[in-house]
């Protein structure tokens, strides 16, 4: 068995320490590594923030559209199917998106309590490309008004329901996003009861 050469061992340890010190002092590539770690997080924040902004804008526009359509109809003294058609034809401009024709749906309902204990749907008109079922009710049946609204004995109201199928830009960023938007608006007719069916 040969004796251990402690001098050679010390030299090797000193060389290893020197090599480790040089590696520790070398900062080449640190910025690249940090950028590689932080870039996916920044992209996720950017995409998520953009998606939330678009989603909030769609909610706002759907709500604005429901209010605009109900308000426009409530200004008529008597409404016809041509009036309804002309209002529905500009729905894409009101919504601010071209895909509303395929992904949106508007339901206008006249709800009246005149002569009855419970409000009933006097008539309904529907338009758009993504057919949906009214949450207010069906014609000649009891109406369920949004927000628990209660009508007086002779009240009539126009209710606009807007359905919009939102398509996420980055579907995988926010997987639990509710893509079926639903907004309502209720207006009292200004010049007449508007309980006569427009024939649509």
Image: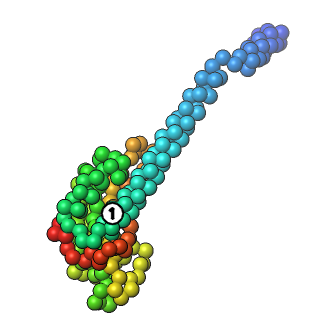
> Dividing the image into 4 quarters, which one contains the N terminus?
top right
| Residue assigned mark 1 | 72
Query: Horizontal and vertical percent for residue 187?
Result: 38, 71
Q: Of residues 65 and 28, which is closer to you in this image? A: 65
Image quadrant where residue 105 sits = bottom left
Query: Horizontal and vertical percent for residue 161?
Result: 33, 65
Residue 3 seen in the figure = no
* Residue name at image x 33 percent, y 63 percent: 72
* Residue name at image x 63 percent, y 19 percent: 29
Residue 194 seen in the figure = yes
Query: Horizontal and vertical percent for residue 183?
Result: 38, 63
Image quadrant where residue 117 sits = bottom left
Vertical position of residue 43 compared to residue 130: above or below? above
Image mark count: 1
Query: Mark 1, residues whose alpha carbon is within 10 Å: few (<14), some, or many (≥20)?
Result: some
* Residue name at image x 33 percent, y 67 percent: 75
Query: Horizontal and vertical percent for residue 10?
Result: 82, 13
Vertical position of residue 82 compared to residue 49: above or below? below
Say what secondary structure mark 1 lies in.
helix
Instruction: Judge from the rendering whether residue 128 lies leftward or rightward of residue 93; answer left or right.
Output: left
Vertical position of residue 81 compared to residue 90: above or below? below
* Residue name at image x 29 percent, y 78 percent: 193
Q: Of residues 30 and 154, which is closer to you in this image? A: 154
Vertical position of residue 53 compared to residue 4: above or below? below
> Dividing the image into 4 quarters, which one contains the C terminus?
bottom left
């Amino acid at each position: 068995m040969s004796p251990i050469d402690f001098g050679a061992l010390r030299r090797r340890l000193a060389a290893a320490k020197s090599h480790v010190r040089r590696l520790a002092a070398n900062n080449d590539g640190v910025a690249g590594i940090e950028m590689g770690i932080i870039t996916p997080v920044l992209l996720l924040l950017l995409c998520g923030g953009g998606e939330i902004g678009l989603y909030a804008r769609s909610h706002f526009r759907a709500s604005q559209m429901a209010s605009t359509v109900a308000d426009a109809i409530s200004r008529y003294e008597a409404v016809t199917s041509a009036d309804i058609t002309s209002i529905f034809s500009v729905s894409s401009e009101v919504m601010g998106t071209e895909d509303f024709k395929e992904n949106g749906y508007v339901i206008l309902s006249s709800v009246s309590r005149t002569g009855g204990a419970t409000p009933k749907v006097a008539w309904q008109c529907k338009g758009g490309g993504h057919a949906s079922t009214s949450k207010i009710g069906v014609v000649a049946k009891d109406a369920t008004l949004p927000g628990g609204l209660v009508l007086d004995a002779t009240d009539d109201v126009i209710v606009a329901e807007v359905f919009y199928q939102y398509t996420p830009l980055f579907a995988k960023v926010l997987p639990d996003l509710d893509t079926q938007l639903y907004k309502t608006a209720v207006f009292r007719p200004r010049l007449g009861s508007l309980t006569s069916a427009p024939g649509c």
